[in-house]
Image (cartoon, rainbow, N blue to C red):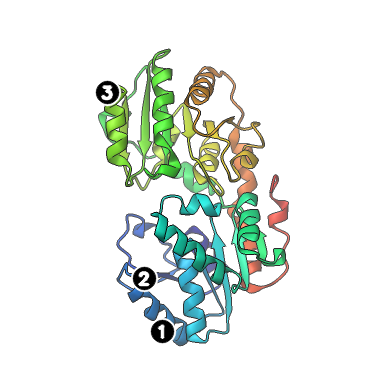
């Protein structure tokens, strides 16, 4: 949505085409962007509407993101006889993005991606890891793939971070606050974070807030009770403004087993927070410049994560992550996206340090 708004402000007409607009984020859509709502979540109903849209509107360029949308766009463009430029965006390492799917659906999705990805005019990846993986997995010409990291809008994040947090758990306390933001899925690996937090609380008083919602909530709640953490851990559910929680944190933690460009970590840096993150497949290590801007720990190692969190909590002079976040200014990524969407040369992405 931020990218759509930024491109619209460059003078282009931008349509945001969605299955349905029933979303907690609907109010975030920039006013310059026209919303095309198909009013359904069913792929079988979306596909014919997408075909009709391409035939009627015939945009100069279309771009999709995430696996199912990428597959549907390629199929719809072929069936519509669309002659414009088709760009797909791969947001994570392939295996990591498919890991939460049931086995049969995972196999079908991988098969369809293999057929469809090579038919795109260009592929955008938000990380080196995702780009290398998509080229190897789907045998895509390297010249078709461009790496553009996600934008970090420091001004917007800072403004939202200043909004008050509601609830007794957010009140001032002598206990240090640890925050994690992400969907409650296996890929975010909240159980490892909880086990690490159990070790932390044995050595100092602390609170943990996990901002996000997802299918693993019940098992996570059960583990919280099993570990005796009910009074010190809060699952907030979805929050359209996680930045207020992040700004209140002493440490922001990511326990993911796989990422593309880890937005939450970049946003934590923009808020000047200390960061602890797993050195998972993806570009987390590149973003943190191999530990310069935050602590990296092995995936699934709760003892190492606990040690890193304790070190971060005790750190008196953490690195100023705002310096690193400035490398991902929206102006740089918008220019790079436009170059790919329009098929024109650009060097903006190359100027982003570390990418």
- Of callouts 3 and 2, the N-terminal one: 2
- Of callouts 2 and 1, the N-terminal one: 2
Q: Nearer the viewer, mark 3 or mark 2?
A: 2
Distance (Cα) linking label 3 and label 2: 42 Å
Residue at the disc numbered 1: 52
Q: Residue furthest top?
A: 203
In the image, what residue occupies the spot 44% across and 87% down?
56
Seen in the image, is 275 located left or right of residue 159? right
* Residue 74: image tag: none
Q: Nearer the viewer, residue 336 or 202?
A: 202
* Residue 246 spot, x, y in % from top left: 44, 35
Seen in the image, is 333 located left or right of residue 276? right
User: In this picture, is 242 found above or below 50?
Assistant: above
* Residue 334 spot, x, y in % from top left: 60, 60
* Residue 259 spot, x, y in % from top left: 53, 46
Does the CB distance between marks 3 and 2 fall below 8 Å?
no
Quarter of the view holding residue 18? bottom left
User: In this picture, is 242 found above or below 174?
Assistant: below
Residue at the disc numbered 2: 43
User: In this picture, is 230 found above or below 145?
Assistant: above
Distance (Cα) linking label 3 and label 1: 53 Å
Residue at the disc numbered 3: 231
In the image, what residue occupies the spot 58% across and 81% down?
84
Q: Is residue 161 visible?
A: no
Seen in the image, is 178 located left or right of residue 238? right
Of helix, strand and loop, which one carries label 2?
A: helix
Of helix, strand and loop, which one carries label 3?
A: loop
In the image, what residue occupies the spot 46% across and 86% down?
55
């Amino acid at each position: 949505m931020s990218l759509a708004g930024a491109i619209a402000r460059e003078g282009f007409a931008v349509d945001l085409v969605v299955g349905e607009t029933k979303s907690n984020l609907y109010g975030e859509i920039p006013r310059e962007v026209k919303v095309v709502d198909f009013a359904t979540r069913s792929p079988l109903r979306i596909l014919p509407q997408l075909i009709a849209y391409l035939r009627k509107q015939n945009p100069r360029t279309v771009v999709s993101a995430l696996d199912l949308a990428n597959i549907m766009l390629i199929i719809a463009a072929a069936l519509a006889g669309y002659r414009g430029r088709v760009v797909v965006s791969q947001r994570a390492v392939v295996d990591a993005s498919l890991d939460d799917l049931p086995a049969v659906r995972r196999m079908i999705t991988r098969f369809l991606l293999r057929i469809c990805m090579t038919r795109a005019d260009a592929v955008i990846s938000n990380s080196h890891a995702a780009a290398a993986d998509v080229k190897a997995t789907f045998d895509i010409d390297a010249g078709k793939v461009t790496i553009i990291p996600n934008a970090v809008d420091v001004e917007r994040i800072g403004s939202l971070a200043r909004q008050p947090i509601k609830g007794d758990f957010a009140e001032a306390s002598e206990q240090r606050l640890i925050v994690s933001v992400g969907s409650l899925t296996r890929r975010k690996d909240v159980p490892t974070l909880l086990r690490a937090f159990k070790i932390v609380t044995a050595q100092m008083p602390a609170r943990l807030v996990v901002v996000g919602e997802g299918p693993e909530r019940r098992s996570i709640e059960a583990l919280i009770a099993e570990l005796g953490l009910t009074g010190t851990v809060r699952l907030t559910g979805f929050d359209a403004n996680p930045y207020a929680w992040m700004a209140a944190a002493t440490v922001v933690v990511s326990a993911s087993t796989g990422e593309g460009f880890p937005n939450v970590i970049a946003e934590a840096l923009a808020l000047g927070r200390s960061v602890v993150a797993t050195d998972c497949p993806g570009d987390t290590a590149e973003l943190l410049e191999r530990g310069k801007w935050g602590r990296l720990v092995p995936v699934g190692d709760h003892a190492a994560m606990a040690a890193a969190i304790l070190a971060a909590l005790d750190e008196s002079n953490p690195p100023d992550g705002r310096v690193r976040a400035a490398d991902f200014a929206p102006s740089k990524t918008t220019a790079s996206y436009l170059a790919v969407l329009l098929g024109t040369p650009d060097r903006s992405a190359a100027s982003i340090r570390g990418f």
